[in-house]
Structures are given as C-alpha cells and as structure tokens.
C-alpha cells in the first residue's frame, strides 16, 4: 500500500488496519489466532507553514499515536520500554519499544528495519505500531462515547528549549498537563537533539502545542500570550534556555 501511494507521489501516509494474524503452534496443533490493531506512519508529520517548517515522522510520533489511542480508550498505566534486540524481527533494534500495561505486554512500536524497507523498494523511513486487540479490549473500563467534530480551526505553536541532558523529556509534558489550560487541545514532543551546536551536558527539546476553542475562532494574539506564558513557565521550572 505504501509503495503504491509513493509511486503516485503521495509520500506522507498515516494508515491503520484491524485484522487477524496466525501464529504457528506446531504441525500437530491449529495456529493461534490473534486479532491485532496496526498502524504505520511515513513521510511528513506536519506540513511546512509560515511559522513552522515541515517535520518528518519519527518514533515520538508513532508513540504519541499509541498513547492517544489508549488514552481515548481509558486504558492507563502504560509504559514504553526498550524491546530486546532478538525480538525485533522486522523493526530496528534500539529504535523499538514494547508497550506494557502495568506489567502486561500489549504491543510494540518502532521504526521499520531498513532492510525490510529495501525489500519493498521503499526509500523513506516508516514507523509502525501493533496492539493486541484481544488484550486491550478487556482493559477498556467503559463504553466510549465519540466527540463531535470541532466547529472552529486549531492553531499550532512550537516550543524549543535547551535543558539538562539527564532531565526526562516527559517532565515537560507533565508540567503542561498540570497547567490545565482549557484552550490546549493536544501537545507532544517531536524532536530531541544533541550535537555540536548544543552546550555540553545539554539537549534541545522541541514540543508542539495545538490550541482550539469550542466557542470561537482563536486570534493569534491570544494564542501567542498563552504560549509565551507556557514557555516562560518551562524555562523557569527547569532552569532552561532558548536556542541562540
């Protein structure tokens, strides 16, 4: 599917599928049937605009998709841990995470191995997740009601700050969540960078925050005011700095 779309110059794709897989249990037994939810990302995560550059998909995007899906299903206590190399059958070792609900394995997310991409004549990176539908369906605590489609447009803004290398990036997300700003619709980390342009023992963290009102179209000045307050809060809380 990806190869066919890319051949038609549709290079940014977000696909998902629900279906069964079959695992062999030996020639004397019927294969084990498991219903799975799978998704794949490739190409650009966000298009270029006047206030932000085009951003390609990365591991944090596929991780964010899984987190948002499980959050919508009211499944909590989710943890991502490094997948053992010998379990990465078609994903890139060191760039793949197993997904745990408390201590129960429910799926995986990661970058598709370059050799697998070459086998399908794909020349751009792609990221995949798989979730065991049978397991997660038992974890859903209640009937989920859908939300109406938003009537008003959203506005996205980025924050890039320099923090201590040892500081967990998730701490920044926790602070934003604690603020309880009603106009924040979504926020996620999309880039972590360490290199010659970054001071020693520091790293650059980039976040994207999406704002939307349920009642009106937001003006740039009111979003900018809220966004600056959030940036200032993060800078002060973590003794961080802006890129120079």
Image (cartoon, rainbow, N blue to C red):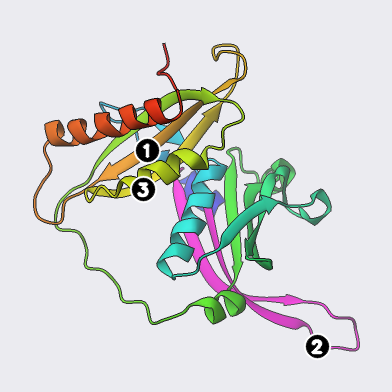
Closer mark to the observer between disc 3 and disc 2: 3
Between discs 3 and 2, the one toward the N terminus: 2
Q: For this view, does 161 lie left or right of residue 117?
A: left
Q: Residues within 10 Å of mark 2 (few under 14, many from 20)?
A: few
Q: CA distance from mark 3 to mark 2?
A: 50 Å
- Quadrant in the picture for residue 215: bottom left
Q: Which residues are magenta?
A: 11-40
* Residue 176, horizontal then vertical, whole percent: 36, 43
Q: Residues within 10 Å of mark 1 (few under 14, many from 20)?
A: some
Q: Which residue is mark 1?
A: 208
Depicted 176 relative to depicted 99: above or below:
above
Q: Residues within 10 Å of mark 3 (few under 14, many from 20)?
A: few
Q: Is residue 25 magenta?
A: yes
Q: Is residue 57 visible?
A: no
**Secondary element at tag 3:** helix
Between discs 1 and 3, the one toward the N terminus: 3
Q: CA distance from mark 1 to mark 2?
A: 48 Å
Q: Which residue is mark 2?
A: 30
Closer mark to the observer between disc 1 and disc 2: 1
Q: Main secondary structure of the magenta part?
A: strand
Q: Which residue is mark 3?
A: 178
Which residue occupies 38% across, 31% down?
A: 234
**Secondary element at tag 1:** strand
Q: Is residue 117 visible?
A: yes
**Secondary element at tag 2:** loop
């Amino acid at each position: 599917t990806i190869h066919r779309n890319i051949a038609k110059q549709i290079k940014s794709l977000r696909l998902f599928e629900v279906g069964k897989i079959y695992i062999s249990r030996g020639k004397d037994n019927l294969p084990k049937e498991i219903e799975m939810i799978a998704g794949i990302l490739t190409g650009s995560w966000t298009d270029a605009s006047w206030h932000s550059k085009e951003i390609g998909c990365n591991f944090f995007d596929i991780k964010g998709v899984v987190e948002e899906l499980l959050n919508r299903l009211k499944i909590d206590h989710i943890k991502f841990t490094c997948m053992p190399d010998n379990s990465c059958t078609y994903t890139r070792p060191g760039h793949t995470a197993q997904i745990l609900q408390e201590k129960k394995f429910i799926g995986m997310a990661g970058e598709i191995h370059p050799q697998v991409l070459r086998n399908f004549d794909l020349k751009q990176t792609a990221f995949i997740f798989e979730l065991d539908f049978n397991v997660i369906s038992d974890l859903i605590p209640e009937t989920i009601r859908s939300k109406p489609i938003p009537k008003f447009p959203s506005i996205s803004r980025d924050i890039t700050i320099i923090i201590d290398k040892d500081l967990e990036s998730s701490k920044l997300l926790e602070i934003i969540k604690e603020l309880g700003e009603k106009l924040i619709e979504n926020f996620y980390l999309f880039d972590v960078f360490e290199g010659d342009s970054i001071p020693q023992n520091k790293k650059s963290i980039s976040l994207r925050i999406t704002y939307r009102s349920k009642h009106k179209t937001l003006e740039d000045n009111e979003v900018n005011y809220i966004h600056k307050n959030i940036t200032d809060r993060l800078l002060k809380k973590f003794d961080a700095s802006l890129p120079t």
